Image: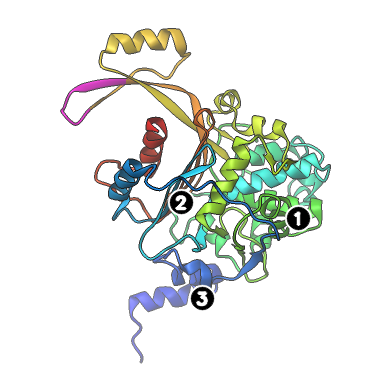
Amino acid sequence: MMRIYPFLFIVLCLLSSCYAIRAYKYRGLKLTDNQRMPHVPVYKGETTSTFIAPQADAYLKIKNQLDSQLNNSYTAAFLVVRNDTLIYENYFDGFNKESLLPSFSVSKSFTGILVGIAIDEGKIGSVNDPVTKYLPELAKKDARFSKITLQHLLDMRSGLKFDEGSYGLKDDAIKLGFSPNMKKRALRTKIVKEPGGAMEYQSIDTQLLGMVLERATGKKVSQCLQEKIWQPLGMESNAFWTTDKRKQEVVFGGMNATARDYAKLGRLMLDNGVCNNQQVVSRQWIHASVSSDSLDRYEGYRNQWWGVKSYKYFNDSLEAVQYLASHMEGGGVKSYKDKSGAKRFYVPDAYAAYQAEGILGQFVYVNPAKRLIIVRLGHYWKNPRYSYVNGFISALGNAL
């Protein structure tokens, strides 16, 4: 009798689940694997726009500093745009400005903007509409779905059952993203608690928003992106959106584009939804999504965007306590040791910035007060000083 190694036996046991086979195929994910996955194109328009090129050596100090810090950090692309000027741009590990790099969950922020546009145009009535208005089959399965609004999905407060975070074969995001029929799997989701509670990050909410967009507009999400964002913003390159085998977009994490074009999403946000004298998405939607007061009210996550807090640093704990008493309602004084071993103190302050972010360390960071955009694309972050890429980006944003 033929002997089957345990590993092969496990694989054979998974043959009844196509998602597992696809997930295993891409288990050692490379940033170029997106090219081999099924996808649909997103075409640029006839007119494109770019950022202002700086004078030669105008930002040489920043360039030398960032080149050194980003080398061997598993970064593929890093851009810094201030006042519409591209003050830093570099690519690593064989990538360049034409490389179409995966955004993963940065896609969610694009989806949030598309929902805002659909509301502006009257295709979607309101964020308070129940999801069942657009996906009535959910109500037939469980009447409680009528309590879940689009706002609950936008803010990830739906109360749906979705176990995400381990990103192994049992992770629901992996099961959904590698499913040959994502729509069918998404519609099988169940409710575990009342909507409107604490924010719980789960990609099913974004995937359902994509299905709502498709029903409300009569177009695929990638078509909406092309017509409502890609071409109006004058993107410089074509993009593509990863799909399942039925050409259903992986709405929660399948967008692929160049670093410069990702930065243009940040510019749209900075300009309150205006691009080339056209109101692409309403100012009201931008404010509701990323204003400091809105992010504070909704605990740092609103309409598929993450808030980024600023911090005030002090050498003395009494100064920190006094600042907290006069400026903060809560948050507390925290401490750490600097390079010299001296104890320093800090207090979380207001949401001074916001960002779209994706797994492996994809970021579109926006700081309105400084007219600053930072884009980082790559693999898991590696840096001797900063344990996490978001800490590096936030520190850079504060320093510039």
- Check the picture and name the quadrant holding the C terminus: top left
| Residue 340 counted in the magenta span | yes
- Check the picture and name the quadrant holding the N terminus: bottom left
Look at discs 3 and 1 and give the one toward the viewer: 1
Q: Position of residue 263 (x, y in %)?
A: 54, 47
Left-right relation of 15 to 334:
right
Residue in the picture at 69% in, 57% down: 47
Query: Badge 1 is on which residue?
Result: 214
Q: Amino acid at mark 3?
A: Leu
Query: Badge 3 is on which residue?
Result: 15
C-alpha span from label 3 to label 1: 31 Å
Residue in the picture at 22% in, 28% down: 338
Pointer 3 or 1: first along the chain = 3
Q: Amino acid at mark 2?
A: Ile
Q: Give the structural element (helix, strand or loop) at label 2.
A: loop
Residue in the picture at 29% in, 20% down: 345
Q: Position of residue 382 (x, y in %)?
A: 30, 50
Query: Badge 2 is on which residue?
Result: 359
